[in-house]
Amino acid sequence: DALVYIEIEEWKSIITKRMFGIFILAFLLILSIILLSYFTIKNLVQQKKIAEIRTDFANNVTHELKTPLAALGIAIDSLKKKEVQSNPNLRNDILGLVERQKNRLQKITDKILESSFSNEIILDKKKIRASTFLSESIDEFKSSLNEDKDVQWNINIEENENDFIGIDAVYFSNILNNLLDNGLKYSKENPSIEINAYSKNNKYLIEIKDNGIGIPKEEQIEIFNKFYRVKTGNRHDVKGLGLGLFYAKRIIEAHGGNIELESTKNIGSKFIITLDKL
């Protein structure tokens, strides 16, 4: 009986040692699988991030260059007209527009290249008189419109000695162009744009109002998201990527400001930009 007992204990010890070795191997195998999965997922996330940055870069280039290229196209078409060719003053005015848009394209290109792969907005903020900047930017936008675009403008820009703001003029000009362009794209047969700019306490407010198709209340919370386009506004004659308002909000917030929307379906929309005064 004693001999049998010893043999059983020895087998238990042998089996325990073998099972321990199997457990160690199984643990190491599972750990290897976990580590391999972790590094695989990490690599996929990094690749996805790089792909998103590249996509954002391409979309940003497309969006930022759209307005100046359109203005250049209109200017070139105008230069081909006989009445322009026979009028030196008018021709020089249009050539001046071409020169300004060329310079603007160069500045936009430089800025896109600066921030293309950093996922950051690099601002060149300068002290600028808001009333002067807005007046010049609006005039520039109006000069880039087709002659057959009959727009009713109601512009009220308050002027005072203390309406200075710190902004990157190139970025902010793009924002204004985008908001004005949207107001016209989604307007009715007789487009009307109202612009109000004024100081309030230590803030400077810019309001851009249109009489377009408006944005339904349930969709207004999404309007500043990337690639989002209002369903009722997705008309066959209006093309877009759903990036304009996303970039506008991002750039304004980079300036320490804020943009809000007030809109009623079939009546129109109003965008309100709030900035700190200097």
Image (cartoon, rainbow, N blue to C red):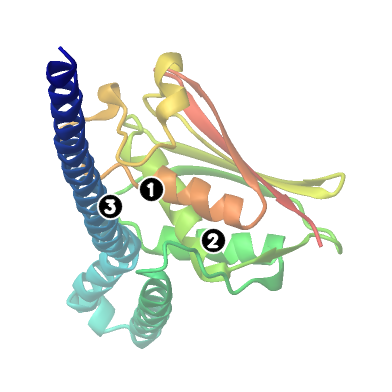
Q: Which residue is mark 3?
A: 42
Identified at 33% across, 29% down, the residue is 188
Q: Which residue is mark 1?
A: 244
Query: Is tag 2's residue or tag 1's residue first in the polypeptide sequence?
Result: 2
Give the Cα distance between marks 1 and 3: 31 Å
Identified at 41% across, 24% down, the residue is 214
Q: Which residue is mark 2?
A: 172
Q: Is residue 92 above or below residue 130?
A: below
User: For the residue carrying disc 1, how many other residues have a C-alpha within 10 Å: few (<14), some (14-19), or many (20+)?
Assistant: many
**Horizontal and vertical percent for residue 253?**
59, 50
Answer left or right for 3 relative to 164. Answer: left
**Horizontal and vertical percent for residue 41?**
23, 48
Q: Amino acid at mark 3?
A: Lys
Give the Cα distance between marks 3 and 2: 37 Å
Answer left or right for 168 relative to 152. Answer: right
Query: Is tag 3's residue or tag 2's residue first in the polypeptide sequence?
Result: 3
Q: Is residue 232 above or below residue 77?
A: above
Q: Is residue 48 above or below residue 170?
A: above
Query: Is tag 1's residue or tag 3's residue first in the polypeptide sequence?
Result: 3
